[in-house]
Amino acid sequence: MKSRKRGLFITSISLVLIVIIALYHYLPRLTDLLIYDTLGFNEGTHLGSSVNFFLYDTVKILILLFLISSLMGVVNAYFPIERLRIYLTSRNLYGFQYFFASLFGAITPFCSCSSIPLFIGFVNGGIPLGVTFSFLITSPLVNEVAVAMFLGSFGIKATLIYALSGIILGALGGMILGRFKLERYLSDWVKQIQSQSEQMTDKWEVENTPFIDRLPYIIKDGRGIVKRVILYVIIGIGIGAVMHGYVPENFFTEYLSADKWYSVPLAVILAVPMYANAAGIVPVIQVFVSKGVPLGTAIAFMMGVVGLSLPEATLLKKVMKWRLIAIFFGTVTTFIILLGYLFNLIL
């Protein structure tokens, strides 16, 4: 009976996957058919262009988000947080611990604020501060939400460059911050917890649950991620659709054009006071690029929005002093600006 249920589940998943892939492939034609032929919008109008942009990008991004979230769920199921914690604290990794922490940040679906509780757990668990910063830097910048949306909006080349540079930024940023020996700027209660913490054991019990039995929970988690960010997706794409249909071509190019040396720093500075996750900002970035803003400048703006924010600084105040927050923000801002210039050269 159990094997019959497994077979039925595998068949159902396979059929759903085929339908999703077919829908994604024919989505542009289906969207045009619905918006222009069935609903009667005029293809040449601002409203028709905006509605088409909104429907197409919403469905496309939600499909990619679900598929990549489920894939990352498989990774997380076999590489849980506790194993990473033990691995980073019990071995001499010759500096690769920064890269591993940054990579882990990339596969966790957190924005800058929601990644802070895990960051606090790392600090309290005795993981070196520089390593925890690697996680904190990369976690909001690169995750399945951002990758899915970037893949759908800018293609595989730009997505790979964006994802790899974000991971490298986290690793280098954490390494540099770790060299500064900034533990003295942690809050007093964090230091107290660290001094009382006991050494974690190197043993970790590996679950023997078959993959097929884990898959329903992985898919459920993937749906949960989509549900949690769907509002941000709709709002972000809605803003992008309005900008796509109504904003004049030269609105952003006037201030963030390629021929202005200050366009990248200005984009990052303007982004820091804002707060959004990748689901809300990538559609806006797509419109920026369509209006003539260089892709590197647009990515720098996005990184500033998702990776640096005033709410994040407020939450970090629970575990560190303002001087450390300023050092962290300053370091990451500098790296993002440099990446923006680099992106504009290679993309």
Image (cartoon, rainbow, N blue to C red):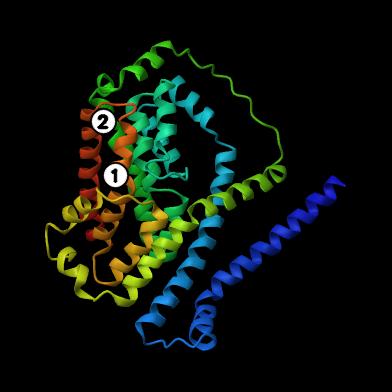
Which callout, 2 or 1, points at the residue further toward the start of the chain? 2
Residue 221 image point, x, y percent: 59, 47
Q: Nearer the viewer, residue 52 or 65?
A: 52
Query: In this picture, is 86 found above or below 246?
Result: above
Q: Is residue 319 left or right of residue 72?
A: left
- Residue at image coords 32%, 32%: 316
Q: Which mark is residue 308?
A: 1
Q: Position of residue 231 (x, y in %)?
A: 47, 57
Amino acid type, label 1: Leu
Left or right of 1? Residue 69 is left
- Residue 133 is situated, as x and y percent measured from the top left of the image, at 33, 33
**98 or 194, which is in the foreground?**
194
Residue at point 55%, 72% (across, down): 25
Q: Quadrant for residue 179, please give it.
A: top left
State how many labels appear: 2
Label 2 or label 1, whichever lies nearer to me, is 1
- Quadrant of residue 92 within the rendered picture: top left
Measured Cα–Cα span from mark 2 to mark 1: 16 Å
Q: Secondary structure at mark 2?
A: helix
Numbered tag placed on residue 177 in the rendering: 2
Residue 346 visible: no
Residue drawn at x 62%, y 46% is 218
Q: Which disc number belongs to residue 276? A: none
**Position in image of residue 305 (x %, y %):** 30, 51
Question: What is the crowding at mark 2: few (fewer than 14 residues within 10 Å), some, or many (at least 20)?
Answer: some
Q: Is residue 6 above or below residue 317?
A: below
Q: Residue 131, relative to residue 236: is it above or below?
A: above
**Residue 292 drawn above or below residue 39:** above
Question: Viewed as shown, does residue 148 lie left or right of 275?
Answer: right
Q: Secondary structure at mark 1?
A: loop
Kind of residue at disc 2? Leu
